[in-house]
Amino acid sequence: MLRALRTLILGLAAAFPSAGAGTVVLSTGYWTTFCYACLAALITAVVSLLQNVASFLPDDPT
């Protein structure tokens, strides 16, 4: 859980400078690009959480 939270915080921190670069590449507004970067950070955090949960499950015997 803490690893996923750390991943989310790092992703949100990375969203600030990447949104600036994204506005130049995508020709969209800063806040629109920032929202997409935050959404990407949230998806990455959820995947990280799922990986952590899956590591506690027993291996598939098949």
Image (tube, grey):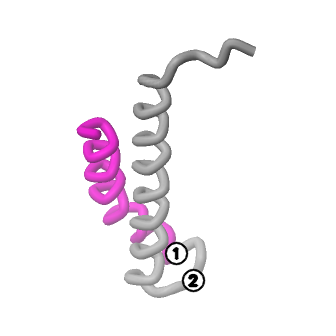
Name the mark on residue 24: 1
Q: Is residue 4 magenta?
A: yes
Inter-mark Cα distance, 1 to 2: 5 Å
- Tell me if residue 12 comes above or below residue 32 in the rendering: above
Quadrant showing the N terminus: top left
Q: Residue at x 41, y 59 (%)?
A: 42
Provide the residue span drawn in magenta.
1-23
Q: Please, what is the three-letter code of the amino acid marked with disc 2?
A: Ser
Mark 2 lies on a secondary structure that is loop
The answer to whether 9 appears left or right of 11 in the picture is left
Relative to residue 36, is residue 49 depicted above or below? above
Q: Which mark is drawn over residue 45?
A: none
How far across and how far down the image is residue 53, in percent?
A: 42, 34
Front residue (pair 30, 39): 39
Q: Are marks 1 and 2 in contact (CB under 8 Å)?
A: yes
To which quarter of the image does residue 38 belong?
bottom left
Q: Position of residue 36 (x, y in %)?
A: 48, 71
Give the position of the C terminus as an image quadrant.
top right
42 or 60: nearer the viewer: 60
Secondary element type, mark 1: helix
Q: How crowded is mark 2: few (under 14 residues within 10 Å), some or many (20 or more)?
A: few
- In the image, 55 versus 38, the foreground residue is 55
Q: In this view, does 54 lie to the left or right of 31?
A: right
Kindly report the secondary structure that dominates the magenta region of the rendered protein: helix
Q: Mark 2 points at which residue?
A: 27
- Image point 30% across, 36% down: which residue? 3
Residue sticking out furthest to the bottom: 29
- Magenta stretch holds residue 62: no
- Report x, y in % for residue 33: 47, 76
* Residue that lies at the very extreme toward the top in this rendered image: 61
Percent from the top left, x then y, of residue 23?
Answer: 49, 77
Identify which amino acid the numbered label 1 is placed on. Val
